[in-house]
Amino acid sequence: MSYQTILTTLENNILTITINRPDKMNALNKTVIAELSTAIEEVYQNKDIKAAIITGSGTKAFVAGADISEFQNLTVEQAKQLAQVGQDLFFKIEKSPKPIVAAVNGFALGGGCELALACHFIYASENAKFGQPEVNLGLIPGYGGTQRLVSAIGKRKTMEWIMSAKLYSAADAEKAGLVNEVHTPEELLPRLTESLALILTKAPVAINYVIQAVNGYTGEKKGFDLEVELFGKCFGTKDKQEGTSAFLEKRKPNFTGE
Ligand code: COA
């Protein structure tokens, strides 16, 4: 598949999706959103793809937000539509049955921070900067930032981050619980690939159920009930049979994802 605004490479069952508008800080215009949506659909459908990494082209930005030049002259209804299309894509990423992770290699602002938040986890380079600067433009986040940032760093920090529009370093973001690991720019992709390679040795159906169960977190009984449901479903899979048999037979499991 060839794209205008993203690059994709498939290696060792990991699809790397690179948003490729470095002269515009990889800002998310309508074409990027549409192409990302197609690439994520490919992650869902293609059996050779077992996980994906989303990153930005160049050394300065992951994604510096939605493309502000597309905000001129939007009506209230058109703006709602724009937010809805972005949110639909980000839900598709969050609900992917296969791991989709972010390699934040520079500015992750506005929609860029929201894109990283929709991924299952985040590794960042030392030069990364996170923030939700929409109030500088007379706006609020529209791609899920007011919701997912609360789950990531809590309500009070989210209030300050969004109201102040401040930018936060990778170290700040790691301390706040937004980022899993921080590495040098050179080490970022190798370390994230290493982490995914480990995950890809595990039972694929179980990994899918982990994503569903953790996404179902509510802090209330509903989330626990979902866990019971999915734990039970594991017992109807070949992967569970293989995993438990391999343990008892003292050999490595050979999971088929069934
Ligand atoms: N939308 C559209 N274009 C953007 C953009 C965005 N979100 N972010 C950066 N760009 C463009 C700039 O307009 C500039 O284009 P030009 O060269 O044609 O003038 C180019 O990317 C380089 O950006 P520039 O501002 O010159 O780089 P910088 O290193 O001085 O600053 C940022 C980098 C990220 C701090 C700054 O670009 C910025 O604040 N961007 C907007 C962030 C934002 O508000 N995001 C939320 C959007 S809802």
Image (tube, rainbow, N blue to C red):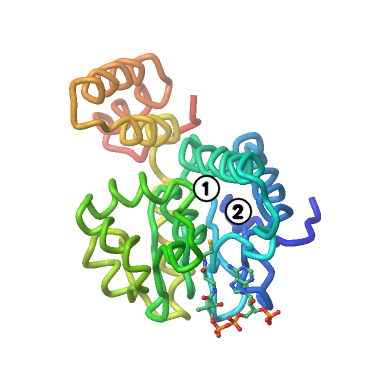
SS of the residue at dot 1? strand
Q: Are marks 1 and 2 in contact (CB under 8 Å)?
A: yes
In the foreground, 43 or 114: 114
Dot 2 amino acid type? Leu
Query: Where is residue 33 drawn, in percent x and y?
Result: 66, 50
Q: Position of residue 148 (x, y in %)?
A: 36, 47
Image position of 215 with respect to 22: above or below: above
At a point 37% along the width and 79% down the height, the residue shown is 126
Q: Residue at x 41, y 52 (%)?
A: 117
Q: Which mark is residue 15?
A: 2
Label 2 sits on a secondary structure element that is strand
Q: Position of residue 254 (x, y in %)?
A: 44, 35
> In this orientation, which residue lies closer to the viewer: 246 or 199?
199
Question: In percent of the image, x 48 and y 57: which residue is there?
Answer: 139
The residue where tag 1 is placed is: 51
State the residue in front, 213 or 135: 135
In the image, residue 203 sits, relative to residue 140, either above or below, namely above
